[in-house]
Amino acid sequence: MTASADLHSRQKAAVAGGVGTRSIFAQRAQNAELWDVDGKRFIDFAAGIAVNNTGHRHPKVMRAVAAQAEQFTHTCFHVAPYEGYVKLAERLNGIAPTGTENRTMLVTTGAEAVENAIKIARAYTKRPGIVAFSGAFHGRTMLGMALTGKVMPYKKNFGPFPADVYHAPFPNQFLGISTEEAIAGLERLFAADIDPERIAAFILEPVQGEGGFNVAPKEFLVRLRELADNYGIVLIADEVQAGMARTGKMFGFEHAGVKPDLVTMAKGLAGGFPLSAVTGRVEIMNAAHPGGLGGTYAGNPLSVAAANAVLDVIEDERLCQRAAEIGRCITDRLTSLASRQGMERIGDVRGLGAMIAFELVEDRQTKTAAPAITNGIVAEAEARGLILLSCGTRLNVVRLLPPLTIEWDVLSEGLDILEASIEAALSAPSGSVAV
């Protein structure tokens, strides 16, 4: 029995079945490469779901954490605050694209940041209603699931969910949902379900993560900003997956030039250590009463040290520019592949910066989803030593999230494996793809 097989058996006997996993048991990792317990090498195009934007174990991040560990690992910021938290808040205040003076609070997970952003918006507006969008993903907590616009695997069997959460259409060019149609759906919501003057916030991702890497059109974000201003609604940018240089700018909203009121961030913020943040306009962030925000582990000192190092790496290594270059390289390869005869099941290639995906369909005319082919590509790639992730409300999208520090030769090798995996999956008889 291999070490991986043994661990898989132990996992089944020890870990709750609802915790979905893959068959890769990690032993060590460095930058864009990972080795499993059997010594097999993988190129990592998942980056811990956009967490390791600065790669696995970036030396500057590891040194910062080690230095902090020599001082203290936990005091609880509410009990004995520390400079690292204040320094990180100052830096996030300076880069969050609200266009005004900001304040920041730190917590631990993306879902926690989202929930606190909702709390803050409700405290500021004194309103209950929240509008999220179809295809959204905002976390696995009860409020996070209520906001999420994707049933499987996140919402099935877990309701009822908190009230006063509504969903409006998200534009999707591939499926023919225009900005005008999405705005019309939002206006129907105002007419039929909730008075806009009872809405505290709009919350949306500039590039949907679990929803399938659908990019919010500039005109859609502009219209939302106008509606928010007209009705006194807080506009929340969920930058948990798109933030921290992933899209070629520090935050995805910056591509549209639209200024949100609050920004949630996590994942790539601390280079593999658990940390999240809410940053936003001072008058909104200060609306909650003292003691109403925070948590025992919120802004853990080790994670804060890592985050300050990550911001240094993003600047020093020009990772925004590098994300754009990586994205062009991936997009060019996928677009070329999709144009070849026999590759008609690649229905769409899309994304922003180094946040790229391709959607699999049975044919390009009907655009019928092909989740089995999607799963086959992911499995084939894993067998060949490449880690991929799927996503999409129709479970038919492969997303590519390599570290922004990936070496060019490793990126090229990974794309070669990806191309071979797509060819193998599309040519394989049904049910014969590697698992």
Image: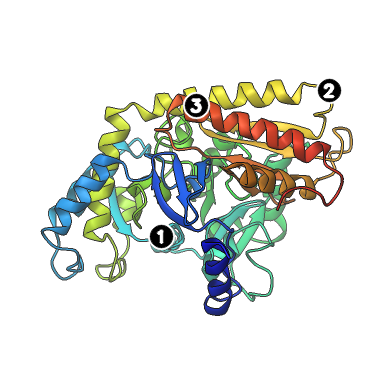
Q: What is the C-alpha distance between the residues marked 2 and 1?
A: 44 Å
285 on left or right of 38: left
Q: Dot 3: within a 10 Å radius of its alpha carbon, few (fewer than 14), some, or many (20 or more) residues?
A: many
Q: Residue furthest bottom?
A: 13
Label 3, label 1: how far apart the Cα atoms are: 27 Å
Q: Which residue is mark 1?
A: 109
Res 341 label: 2
Of 298 and 68, nearer the camera is 68
Between discs 3 and 1, the one toward the N terminus: 1
User: Disc 2 or disc 1, which is closer to the eye?
Assistant: 2
User: How many numbered marks are there?
Assistant: 3
Q: Nearer the viewer, mark 3 or mark 2?
A: 2
Q: Nearer the viewer, residue 165 or 414?
A: 414
Which residue in the protein does label 3 denote? 326
In the displayed structure image, the side of residue 162 where residue 302 appears, left or right: left
Mark 2 touching mark 1, by CB under 8 A?
no
- The earlier-in-sequence mark between 2 and 1 is 1
